[in-house]
Amino acid sequence: MIEQTRIWSAVALLTVVTIACQAAPAPSERVDASRETGARAVAELGSATGVLGAAASAESHATLEAMRVLEEGGSAVDAAITLGFALAVTYPNAGNLGGGGFFLYRSPEGESWYLDFREVAPLAATLEMYLDEEGDPDRKASTRGWKAAGVPGSVFGMWEAHQRWGSLPWARLIQPAIELAEYGFEISFAEAAALNRLKSAFSEDAYAASVFVRSDGRPWIQRDVLRQPALASTLSAIATEGESALREGSIVRAIVAASQEGGGVLAMEDFAEYEPIIRPVHTIAWHDMEVLTITPPSSGSLFLGQTLPVLEEFPLAQWGWRDPRTVQLIGEAEAAAFRDRNRWLGDPASMEFSWIDLLDPSYLGQRALALDPELYTSPDEDLPMPPFESTETTHYSVLDAQGGAVAVTTTLNSSYGAKVMAPGGFLMNNEMDDFAALPGHANQYGLVQSEANAVIAGRRPLSSMSPVIVVKNGKVDSVIGSPGGPTILTTVLQVLLNRYTFEMAPEDAVAAPRFHRQDRPPTLRYEAGRLGRPTLQALQALGQPLAEIRSLGDVNAIFRDGSEWVAVADSRRGGLGQVAVIGSDG
Ligand code: GLY
């Protein structure tokens, strides 16, 4: 059922039209709702008619600000920049200035670009910095506090995207974020619950406590207004000075001082020398389409470049998406791809192995021959289950009237990152935990990785973030991505399979139950109560270890569906997902 609500935010004076997808609607219901929402968005935002675009993100204020930019004639890149800065205010668990991410762009002319603005290990980082006195990984050091923070790349990445492809003025694109921070916005039920849950963690950091812990002592409730004046001031400096506000000067000096005081190793040179990098896009030929994926330090190209062609060798559509053979085979293909990922990948500047060889058709052909949908293959070595993954990372998708498309996945790593706030009013990442603190040992996600991902100064840690754009007949057909640590990879894979192999409607492709396997642990985790008892019993009979998980991923995607664009926000994370669609390409 689609539920539409209109919320007048008394403080921010924003009119918000939201769609909270409780469950996949019937196609006819959905098309009507999209049209109606489009019309309302146009009316609310004072737009002209026509095909203006679509946006999907995890937070409604941010999505609607992106739509305003599109309505003003901004491009998908412009709208994505606005969306990214707005999320840094309205979605502080993962939207960020203090983190990093990946920006995948396909221009209206059909060129594709991948901009890497991932965090970098500080120049003072060392191989041993996350080992305790016994030489064992010190999980707390790599996940909590200033020592866990890599050099943030988000502001530099957005600046680079704007310099290369932006059209509206930089300051205009940041203005909504400044206002949201300055005047505040009404928080959601989920945001209130998260802030209450983390009260004691935020209380350990004076800056974080001043923003995220209420001074009157009562818990946060839905529709409380969250104001962030220090963040507004930092955003104003970024709007006026551009990226140099975070290269040098008073904000950076204060961050470096706080880091040193808090046991971190960030230095002025780290900010001065950080560079966003344009890297190759890897195109996977799949079905009759091109899937644009991103290369290391993301593992998206390797993972999807292995699993999509291998799975194409089997009659999945004929078996059906919930058939035990389908589930087991996808799980086995996922595990095999994770094995190569963890063994070989890292920062491309320090990888000695040509990862592209792992996509060689003869290598993948052998893998397809070895896969058996009725066989469970265990890894060489077993490890305990990793802890439940929290709501880290976020993805947003934007599409403009000219056919330009942007897919951005961005992160602080854990939810609210390292739980320390920079003096400039933004949370710092704990991305250093994405390195292998001690190669051969598990990180917080249970991933066991190699020397290729060891902690080295100036390196970027290996990532699972995997934004994709699908192109069909020369035109964008979908823009997809998700948060979820390693489950990002399996989530994106399964949405692609759902949409294009099982030919599900867009909402169903996102809503369908997900499951996840990686190399270690070999457990197939599946969304609680959603895979069906017969399927689970059949998997159990194969010896496949199973475990329930509350939910996997949080997809924000845009799909072409006949003559319509359908923007779909996942309902998995407490109804936070928001979408906006204006017009159709009728
Ligand atoms: N920090 C999550 C990822 O990059 O995979």
Image (cartoon, rainbow, N blue to C red):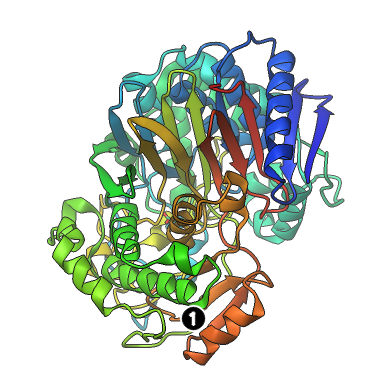
Camera-side residue of 29 and 300? 29
Q: Quadrant of ligand 1?
A: bottom left
Camera-side residue of 458 and 329? 329
Residue under the point 25% across and 45% down:
282
The quarter of the picture where residue 107 lies is top left
What percent of the width, then of the height, locates residue 273? 27, 36
Residue under the point 47% across and 31% down:
251
Q: Is residue 47 above or below residue 421?
A: above
Q: Which residue is mark 1?
A: 523
Q: Amino acid at mark 1?
A: Thr
What percent of the width, then of the height, locates residue 208? 64, 47
Tell which residue pokes out farthest to the front in this image. 318
Total marks placed = 1
Residue under the point 42% across and 45% down:
467
What percent of the width, then of the height, locates residue 540? 54, 88
**Alpha-carbon neighbours of circle 1 within 10 Å: few (<14), some, or many (≥20)?**
many
Name the side, left or right, on which 23 lies relative to 358.
right
What percent of the width, then of the height, locates residue 24? 69, 49
